[in-house]
């Protein structure tokens, strides 16, 4: 079972939340962060390179020093204030007609090491190292990771009761997504939440934040090695996560655009595709309608591609994925793209940008062909994680992104 605990969050006063809260560090480049950041924005802590003119390098020592300086300053000025006791929190995100309700808590680093916190993606050491630096210098988890867990009726009932009350924060962001945040400070409820997780929830699934999760575990191991009196209960053994029941989450498609046709003409590509796919032209922008059906934009036209029977293995957790089918039968076999992580001829577009972004990039001449995929399901993600498999790169896209700055977890 998972191990969790409440924590005394460092968070903004109610009247400052919209000024402090910010998008995650990795969804904005430095120029976009500079344009967005107001005086009190958390971006001065998560992307402190924007405080230099010209903008500094993200990995320069002065940038790291500025992050520490700003975090300290935000607390001194009362823009971030630490709670007086350990609590749990509920964080709801609304996109259109769909709302997902997450419990904000601390997970244990040992659960990542033992596999109770399950991943579905590979991580890169350089990205882990970068996130480790930020956790280490701040001695805090400034931004949460995004976990899923299998539905639990009692936890969801506690969340429903909590959200029937008045929220601590509620605001609409620049993408028109609504963020709502409640505080759970009743001691009996806090104790019961801890008990349910530790006796009934057998795993967490990393939805978004694989590198932050790995970095938190490595910092915990580092601090353990430095402490001759380590017990496993120290605050540095825990890191901040927002945990959502799987039934409330929806994965958005993650699509592909390719710069050239590997020497083929457009007619040659269409001919090559007919070996493994049923191919038909579409009269308007076309979204895939189900598993193993793909959308392609080529030469100003949309096409439907459906993989023929026998070209995939529905009994294989990885072989059944449409990203695997596309990679094997199109990107590798026809277009010569062997490694999605390193090949510069391919790029990836989150489905939140819509089909229009795919056609725009092809029509501009930047790319030659685009493919849209049917989204992976949460059931597929959990099956892959449970079987110890790893998804191909750029398979899942979650929206909305967690807003940073609603809660921060100190490691002391």
Image (cartoon, rainbow, N blue to C red):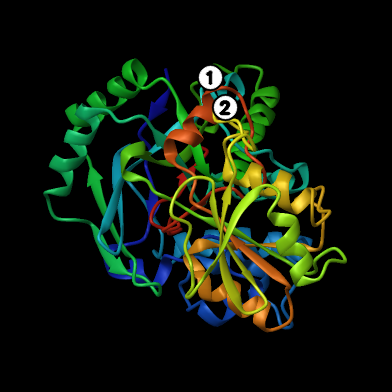
Tag on residue 232?
1
**Which of 143 and 399 lies nearest the eye of the viewer?**
399
Q: In the picture shown, does residue 285 fall above or below 80?
A: below
Q: Residue 323: x, y in percent?
A: 62, 46
Disc 1 and disc 2: Cα gap in Å? 14 Å
> Nearer the N terminus, badge 1 or badge 2?
2
**Label 2: element kind:** helix
Q: In the picture shown, does residue 73 fall above or below 143?
A: below
Asked whether residue 136 is in view, the answer is: no
Q: Quadrant of the N terminus?
A: top left
Q: Mark 1–mark 2 contact, CB under 8 Å?
A: no
**Which of 306 and 11 lies nearest the eye of the viewer?**
306
Q: Is residue 130 left or right of residue 243?
A: right
Crowding at dot 2, Cα within 10 Å, few <14 / some 14-19 / many 20+, comes out as: many
Q: Residue 11: x, y in percent?
A: 38, 55
Asked whether residue 94 is in view, the answer is: yes
**Which of 290 and 202 lies nearest the eye of the viewer?**
290
Residue located 25% across and 25% down the image: 191
Residue located 63% across and 67% down the image: 48
Q: Quadrant of residue 300?
A: bottom right
Tag on residue 302?
none
Residue located 39% across and 49% down the image: 250
Q: Residue 317: x, y in percent?
A: 57, 29
Q: In the picture shown, does residue 116 fall above or below 412?
A: above
Q: Residue 59: x, y in percent?
A: 76, 60
Q: Is residue 224 left or right of residue 200?
A: right
Q: Which residue is mark 2?
A: 112
Q: Is residue 237 left or right of residue 131?
A: left
Q: Nearer the viewer, mark 1 or mark 2?
A: 2
Give the residue furthest to the right.
263
């Amino acid at each position: 079972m998972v191990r969790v605990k409440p924590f005394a969050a460092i968070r903004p006063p109610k009247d400052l939340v919209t000024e402090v809260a910010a998008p995650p560090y990795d969804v904005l480049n430095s120029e976009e962060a500079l344009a967005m950041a107001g005086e009190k924005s958390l971006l001065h802590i998560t992307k402190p390179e924007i405080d230099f003119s010209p903008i500094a390098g993200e990995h320069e020592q002065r940038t790291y020093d500025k992050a520490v300086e700003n975090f300290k300053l935000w607390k001194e000025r009362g823009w971030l204030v630490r709670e007086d006791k350990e609590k749990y929190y509920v964080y709801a995100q609304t996109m259109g007609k769909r709302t997902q309700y997450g419990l904000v808590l601390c997970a244990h680093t040992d659960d990542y090491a033992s596999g109770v916190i399950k991943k579905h993606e590979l991580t890169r050491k350089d990205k882990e190292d970068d996130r480790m630096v930020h956790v280490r210098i701040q001695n805090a988890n400034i931004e949460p990771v995004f976990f899923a867990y299998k539905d639990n009726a009692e936890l969801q009932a506690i969340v429903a009761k909590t959200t029937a009350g008045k929220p601590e924060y509620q605001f609409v962001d620049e993408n028109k997504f609504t963020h709502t945040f409640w505080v759970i400070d009743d001691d009996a409820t806090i104790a019961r939440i801890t008990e349910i997780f530790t006796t009934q929830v057998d795993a967490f699934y990393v939805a978004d934040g694989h590198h932050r999760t790995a970095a938190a575990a490595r910092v915990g191991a580092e601090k353990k090695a430095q402490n001759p009196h380590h017990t496993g209960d120290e605050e540095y053994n825990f890191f901040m996560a927002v945990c959502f029941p799987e039934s409330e989450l929806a994965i958005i498609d993650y699509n592909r655009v390719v710069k050239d046709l590997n020497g083929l003409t457009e007619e040659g590509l269409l001919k090559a595709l007919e070996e493994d796919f049923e191919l038909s032209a579409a009269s308007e922008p076309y979204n895939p309608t189900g598993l193993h059906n793909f959308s392609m934009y080529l030469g100003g036209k949309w096409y439907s591609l459906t993989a023929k029977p026998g070209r995939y293995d529905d009994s294989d957790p990885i072989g059944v994925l449409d990203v695997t089918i596309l990679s094997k039968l199109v990107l590798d076999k026809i277009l010569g793209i062997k490694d999605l992580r390193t090949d510069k001829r391919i790029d990836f577009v989150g489905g939140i940008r819509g089909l229009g972004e795919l056609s725009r990039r092809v029509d501009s001449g930047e790319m030659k062909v685009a493919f849209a995929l049917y989204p992976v399901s949460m059931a597929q993600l959990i099956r892959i994680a449970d079987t110890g498999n790893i998804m191909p790169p750029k398979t899942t896209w979650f929206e909305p992104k967690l807003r940073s700055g609603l809660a921060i977890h100190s490691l002391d």
